[in-house]
Image (tube, coloured by chain):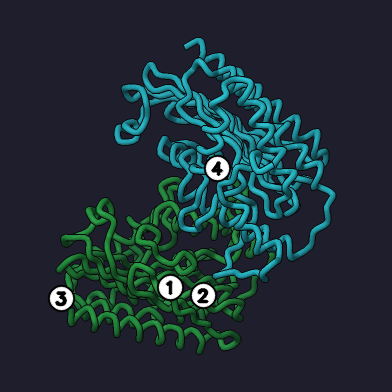
Chain colours: A cyan, B green
Amino acid sequence: MEMQAEAQAFFEGLQTRICDGLEAEDASARFRGDAWQRPGGGGGLSRVLVDGAIFEKAGVNFSSVHGELKPDFAASLPGDGLAFFACGVSLVLHPKSPRVPTVHANFRCLRRGATLWFGGGADLTPYYPEREDVLHFHRTWKTVCDRHDPTFHPRFKKWCDDYFYLPHRGETRGIGGIFFDQLPSAHFAFVRDAADSFLDAYLPIVRRRKEEGWGERERQFQLLRRGRYVEFNLLYDRGTMFGLKTDGRTESILMSLPPLVRWEYDAQFPAGSREAELPSWLKPRDWLGEG
Amino acid sequence: MEMQAEAQAFFEGLQTRICDGLEAEDASARFRGDAWQRPGGGGGLSRVLVDGAIFEKAGVNFSSVHGELKPDFAASLPGDGLAFFACGVSLVLHPKSPRVPTVHANFRCLRRGATLWFGGGADLTPYYPEREDVLHFHRTWKTVCDRHDPTFHPRFKKWCDDYFYLPHRGETRGIGGIFFDQLPSAHFAFVRDAADSFLDAYLPIVRRRKEEGWGERERQFQLLRRGRYVEFNLLYDRGTMFGLKTDGRTESILMSLPPLVRWEYDAQFPAGSREAELPSWLKPRDWLGEG
C-alpha cells in the first residue's frame, strides 16, 4: 500500500506541474478545477482550460478511484479478486491553431487484489506535420526510456503504433510516441521520469508553431481530422472503456473530445496538397532510424 | 433465395422513394450518389444531400453485401455457418434548424446460412421537443404495427427505448419510435409497410417546424446535443459495429455522423430553460397512453 500512496501523491503533483507549465505558456486563460467524488469509491480533480490563446480546450484529469470490478471486466486484468484501485493523470490538449499538433498523455497506477502495475504513454497528432517536430517528440521519449532500460523504447514505440491505430481508416491516430501497460511496480522510477518529461516533449513544438499563419482552409481540415480523434476514443480507446465500465465520471472521461468537430462524407483533397499528404505520415515508421 | 431477391428489389426501390420524397421537400439541393463495391462481395449505393435549405446533411444508404462472417461475430447471430447476406436501407437526416428533429431509420434483411430474418426501426431525436410531434411520430408507428399484429407496437416501442439508450448519460437518444430484430421472414409484409411509412412519420413534423425561428443559442445547443448522437453511434450502435466488423465501407457507415458537432465540458443550462428541460423528455414514456 506504500507504493500506492506514493504513486497517488506523485500523480497529484504531476497534474499541478503540468497545468502550471501550460498556463505559463498560454497566459491568456486559466484552468478551472472541478473536484468530484465517485459513488463507488474515490474521486478526482478535473481541470480544464478553454478558449486560450493557444489551447481551444485543454483537459488535465487527476483521478484516484477504488471499488469492485465487474467480474467480466476483471477477467481481462492481471491480479486476482474484484477489488481495484486506479490512480493517474490523463490529458488531451486541443490547440486552436491547426499548425500546432494535438497531444495526449496518460500515466497511471492500477491495482487488482495484491497486484500493482503501471501504464501510460504519450502520442502526438499533427494536422500539418513537420519532420523536426516528429523527431523532437520521438527523441525525447527515447532519451527518457534509454535512461532506464534499453529495451523500453523499441517496445513502447511499437506498442504505441499498434495501439493508436484505426482499422476502419487504415491509419494510426498520429505520428506515435510511447505506450506501455502492465509494467511491474519496480519501474515506478521510469514512470515518474516519463511523466515529468511530458512538457519537454511537447512545449518546444508548440513554441515553434504557434505563430505560424493559418486560415479557413487549415481550420476546416483540422475540424475534419478531429473527427478521427473522436472515432478512436469512442470506438477503440481502452481508457475510455475502462472509465465508462467502472462507472467513472462521464464529463471527465469525455473531456478528451475536441471542442468542435466536423464530419464530411468522403472528403477528398487535391493530389500533392499537404492535406492529401497527411495519411502518408500516419503509418508506423522508424522516425529516428530514418536519419 | 426468392425472398432475398424480392427484399433486395424492395429496398432498392425504397431508397429511391425516400430520396425523391426528401428532395421534393428540400427543393434547394439534390442527392448525389456513390455506387461502391465491397471487396468481399456485394456493394451499395450511398446517397447524400448536403447544405440543403432543410437538411444540413441527409444520408440514405442502400447496401446489399454477402460473404463470410468472422467466426466470433457469427456466433452472435441466428442461423448456421459463416455465409451471410445483408441488404437494406439505412438513413440519418440532420436538419439545419434546431427546431427540426434529427431522424434515423433502418430496414434490413439478413441471412446466415439458411436462416433469413428482418430488422429495422425508426427513432426521432428532437432538440426542442414538441408534444404534438412526439405523438404524431409514435401514432404513425402504432398504426402501422397494429395493421399487422397487435403485439408488435408495445414490443417494438419498448425495444426502441431499450436499444437507443446511453448508459453513461442516463438518457435515451431521443423520444423513441420502434425497433425490431430477428423478425421471421413471414413478416416481410409488415417490414414493407413500415419502411414505406417513414416519410409519413417524419415529414409532417418537418413541415410544422421548418419555418420556426432560431438563433445562435439554439444552434449551439443543437451542436452540443449532436455530440450525444455521435457517442451513441460509436459507443453502442450495433449497425455501426456490424458494418465495421464485416469490412463495410467506412464512409458509408459513418455517413450517419452529424456534419458539425460540439463538445463542451460539463455544459449547464439555466433551470426552467428549454435546454435544461430536454433530458426529462429522454426517458422511456408511454406517450400515447398518457392521453
Task: Using the numbered discs, state the Cα–Cα distance from disc 2 to disc 3 in whole angstroms.
Answer: 32 Å
Q: How crowded is mark 3: few (under 14 residues within 10 Å), some or many (20 or more)?
A: few
**Distance between the Cα atoms at labels 1 and 4?**
29 Å
Q: Which of marks 2 and 4 is in front?
A: 2
Which residue has dot 1 on it?
B91
Q: Residue A285 in the image: x percent, y percent?
A: 59, 46
Which label was assigned to residue A251? 4
Give the SS element for disc 3: helix
Q: Position of residue B44 (x, y in %)?
A: 39, 76
Residue A290 placement (x, y as % from top left): 65, 43
Given the image, what chain letter belongs to the residue carrying mark 4?
Answer: A
Q: Which amino acid does label 2 sit on?
A: Ala
Q: What residue type is labelled 4?
A: Glu
Alpha carbon distance from label 3 to label 1: 24 Å
Q: Which of marks 3 and 1 is nearer the N terminus?
A: 1
Q: Which of marks 1 and 2 is nearer the N terminus?
A: 2
Report whether mark 3 lies on the same chain as mark 1: yes
Is A55 drawn above or below residue B55 in the view shown?
A: above
Residues at marks 4 and 3 touching, judged by CB atoms closer than 8 Å = no
State the separation of the CA atoms marked 4 and 3. 46 Å
Classify mark 4: residues with Cα within 10 Å, few (<14), some (14-19) or many (20+): some
Determine the residue positioned at 51% across, 86% down: B23
